[in-house]
Image (cartoon, helix red, strand yellow):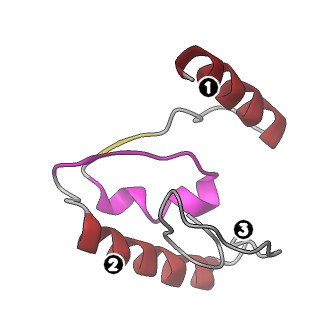
Amino acid sequence: MSAKHGLIHENELIDYYNQRITGRVKENKQWAKRVIATLEKVTDLDNDTFIIIAGNDYKKNIVVKLKNFECPLKGLTGLGHQLHWLKGENSIHG
C-alpha cells in the first residue's frame, strides 16, 4: 500500500515521493475506499487471508472490510522495531 498510489502490485516500481496519510482523517477514509475497491477486483475479501504490514493509520479503515487478516507487526511501535522484526523474519524465511 502506498499513501500516494493506493494499492500497488508487489513488483510494481514507483518513484520516490514524500506523502503520508497519517493524521488526515477524511483523506484516509477516501484512500481506504480506493484501496478496498482495488482489492475487490483482484482478491476475495471474504475468503482470502491478508497479511497487513502497515501502520495503524494505513490499516484501520482497511481491516474493517476484511474477514481474514493478520497484523504481525501489531504491538511493535516505531519503525526501528518493525524493521528489526522484518529483517529477522527475512533471515529465517529468505
User: Going 58% across and 62% down the picture, which residue do you hit?
Assistant: 58
Callout 2 touching callout 3 (CB < 8 Å): no
Q: Secondary structure at mark 2?
A: helix
Q: Nearer the viewer, residue 48 or 57?
A: 48
Q: Label 1 crowding class (10 Å Cα cut-off): few <14, some 14-19, many 20+?
A: few
Magenta stretch: give its range: 47-66
User: Going 30% across and 56% down the picture, which residue do you hit?
Assistant: 66
49 drawn magenta = yes
Q: Label 3 crowding class (10 Å Cα cut-off): few <14, some 14-19, many 20+?
A: few
Report which residue position mark 3 lands on: 22
Q: Nearer the viewer, residue 29 or 2?
A: 2
Q: Residue 88 appears in which quarter of the rendering? A: top right
Q: Which of the labelled discs sits on residue 37, or is there none?
A: 2
Q: Label 2 crowding class (10 Å Cα cut-off): few <14, some 14-19, many 20+?
A: few
Q: Position of residue 69 (x, y in %)?
A: 35, 43
Q: Looking at the image, tell me whether mark 1 or mark 3 is earlier in sequence order.
A: 3
Q: Amino acid at mark 1?
A: Asn
57 drawn magenta = yes
- Above or below, 81 relative to 71: above
Q: Nearer the viewer, residue 26 or 34?
A: 34
Report which residue position mark 1 lands on: 90
Marks 1/2: CA–CA distance: 30 Å
Marks 1/3: CA–CA distance: 27 Å
